Every structure is written in structure tokens, then in C-alpha cells.
Image (cartoon, rainbow, N blue to C red):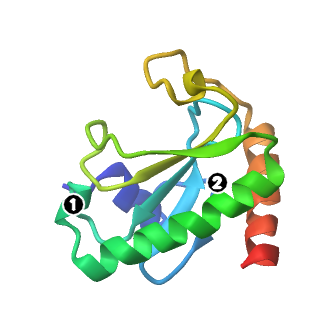
Amino acid sequence: MASIFSKIINGEIPCYKIAETEKCIAFLDVFPLVEGHVLVVPKKEVDYIFDLEESDFTELQLFSKKVARAIKHVISCKRIGVAVIGLEVPHAHIHLVPMNNTDDLNFTKSKLKPSKEQLEEVARKISEAFLINN
């Protein structure tokens, strides 16, 4: 059965897309830890990130770096945190989370519930920064 990420990649479920390549896509988490929380996903459906072929793993990491630079350009933060949890969706993915303190990367805390308009605005700004900076 296709994961929710495969459904997003195939256009069956909408997303707040930041950027995409032939092999990867980045979009906002709709229940973010903090504003600007982005998911970076390989288009190939592989459950465990370390089961990705080496070239796909490398491409995912390099694409994530470019997306992180765009997030940092838009969202005021000290760092972009990186997390690979992999338990909630059976499709490899990387969380990029703007951080000002370690609690910003705490997945046990309550998630934000931004409006559609807020998500659209943040996605637009990060996407524009991605295009300008890459």
C-alpha cells in the first residue's frame, strides 16, 4: 500500500511544496513542531532511510542541505535541526526544523496547528528563497 508521502508525490494528496527534483521533494509538515518545519522525502518509496541506495541517500542529503539554507534564510533561528525518526510513516524522510533551543526538536511536545493561509505563506517564502539561493 502506498504511503501518505507516495500519495503526496503522486499528487493524490495536496501539500505545501517547497521544492522538488527528479528524485526528491520537500514540503511543509502540516503539524509542525515550529514554523518552517519541512519534510524532505525521496520519491522512491523505501521504508528505512539506510536502505536507500547510496546515490539516492546522497541526493536526499544534498537536497536537504539546499532546503535547509532556504529555511534559514526565511525563518529566524540559530540552526536548522535535522531528525530522522522513521516510525510514523513507512517512507524514508528527513525532518528539517528551525531551532533556537533544543526543545524546538522535541517530538513529544504539542504540535502547532497553523492555518491554511499561514502554511501557504511560509511555503511560498521558503520556496522563493530556495529558487534564489540554489
In the picture of the structure, the residue carrying the numbered disc 1 is: 50
User: Dividing the image into 4 quarters, which one contains the C terminus?
Assistant: bottom right
Counting residues from the start of the chain, the first of labels 1 and 2 encountered is 2
In the picture of the structure, the residue carrying the numbered disc 2 is: 16
Indicate whether 77 appears above or below 6: above
Q: Pointer 1: residues within 10 angstroms few (<14), some, or many (20+)?
A: few
Secondary structure under tag 1 reads helix
Secondary structure under tag 2 reads loop
How far apart are labels 1 and 2 at the CA level? 26 Å
Image-based side of 31 in relation to 120, left or right: left
> Residue 109 placed where, x, y %?
51, 16
Image-based side of 31 in relation to 119, left or right: left
Residue shown at 74% from the left, 53% from the top: 72
Q: Amino acid at mark 1?
A: Phe
> Residue 49 placed where, x, y %?
26, 58
Question: Is residue 99 shown to the viewer in this render?
Answer: yes
Question: Is residue 36 shown to the viewer in this render?
Answer: no
Residue shown at 42% from the left, 79% from the top: 23
Quarter of the image for residue 55 reads bottom left
User: Dividing the image into 4 quarters, which one contains the N terminus?
Assistant: bottom left
> Residue 3 placed where, x, y %?
29, 53
Image-based side of 129 in relation to 41, left or right: right
Q: Are marks 1 and 2 in contact (CB under 8 Å)?
A: no
Q: Amino acid at mark 2?
A: Tyr
Closer to viewer: mark 1 or mark 2: 1
> Residue 130 placed where, x, y %?
73, 69
Residue shown at 59% from the left, 33% from the top: 32
Residue shown at 26% from the left, 37% from the top: 87
